[in-house]
Image: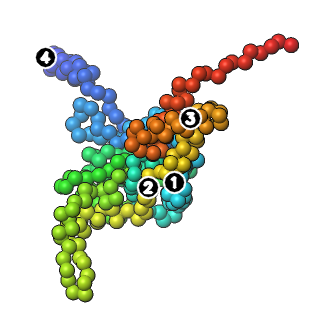
Amino acid sequence: MNQLENFLHRAEALLARVEALLPPAAPRDPDFRHGYAYRWRKRPGAGNIKYLQAVAHTANIRLDDLQHIGPQKEQIEQNTRQFVTKRPANNVLLTGARGTGKSSLIKACLNQFAPQGLRLIEVDKADLADLPDIVDLVAGRPERFVIFCDDLSFEEGEAGYKALKVALDGSIAAQSDNVLIYATSNRRHLMPEKFSDNAGYKHVADDDLHPAETVEEKISLSERFGLWLSFYPFKQDDYLDIVGHWLVSFGCTPEQIEGARGDALRWALGRGSRSGRVAWQFAKDYAGKLPPAPVQEQVDV
């Protein structure tokens, strides 16, 4: 009996030392009432166990901060409003020129509708195969979840391509009514389009052209998004307007904003782009270099 007690005591001591070396357990069901944004993450040192990690500080961008994308902003805002009010709404694909506000628009929608129950879950392309698990985790909850896939594109044969197709519209299970997918990409069809793809077109009766199966496969993913929003490079005046908006937010005076126009154009020329992102970067650089405003001394009366 003493030998058994000694063995159990030594075993408990060994387990205690092993547990101390393991990383802390991550909750699989976070408190959705106190967080608005989450990332799907792999728990370090625990095999393939994944969980939703709450984002402590989310981007505070507002819809009003996004300039010269009015039609796109109106459509995604309306679609998101339908979603949070439990009306029919579509998955959204935002494609086009880099730095034009695609990702920022989704983050701004979160800030706009979070008080109404909207929640955002960011999922990397490498984790798209886990979409069924994520949907099961949030199914039945009262909140409304947008799964956010940023800067999405696929090469030939990538596994995530098929997983996303099934999640959008292709599984035997019905889509959860409290989950939508919003994705951004620089590619309209999310796949590389090659000149050789045109070789698959063939001439048939009545002069119709029928695309080859390769082309059909590339188009089949993007068309599963019910709403397409396209973004285009900004004109020079639009770019300068965006620069002015951000300089105002940094407290610059109208005279300083007018004086910054030439520098803003040279900044864009050096980067080969007049995008909203470039405008934001210039505004931070320009405003940060300005001397601080003089502090007015209070005179005692």
Q: Which residue is mark 4?
A: 3
Q: Is residue 162 left or right of residue 187?
A: left
Work out how far the residue at label 4 is from the one at label 3, CA to CA, in angstroms.
83 Å
Q: Which residue is mark 1?
A: 69
Work out how far the residue at label 3 is from the one at label 1, CA to CA, in angstroms.
23 Å
Crowding around mark 2 (Cα neighbors within 10 Å: few <14, some 14 to 19, many 20+) is some
Question: Residue visible at 42% across and 40% down?
Answer: 269
Tell me which label, 1 or 2, sits earlier in the chain.
Answer: 1
Residue 118's x, y, as percent?
Answer: 50, 50
Q: Which residue is mark 2?
A: 231
Q: Is residue 264 left or right of residue 127?
A: right
Work out how far the residue at label 1 is from the one at label 4, CA to CA, in angstroms.
77 Å
Q: Quadrant of residue 246?
A: top right
Tell me which label, 1 or 4, sits earlier in the chain.
Answer: 4
Residue 247's x, y, as percent?
Answer: 58, 36
Q: Residue 213, can we see it?
A: no
Tell me which label, 4 or 3, sits earlier in the chain.
Answer: 4
Q: Label 3 near label 4: C-beta < 8 Å?
A: no
Q: Which residue is mark 3?
A: 260
Work out how far the residue at label 1 is from the one at label 2, CA to CA, in angstroms.
8 Å
- Disc 4 vs disc 3: which is toward the camera? 3
Q: Amino acid at mark 2?
A: Phe
Question: Does residue 251 sit above or below 181 in this rendering?
Answer: above
Q: Who is closer to the viewer here, 117 or 207?
A: 207
Q: Label 2 near label 1: C-beta < 8 Å?
A: yes
Which quarter shows the N terminus?
A: top left
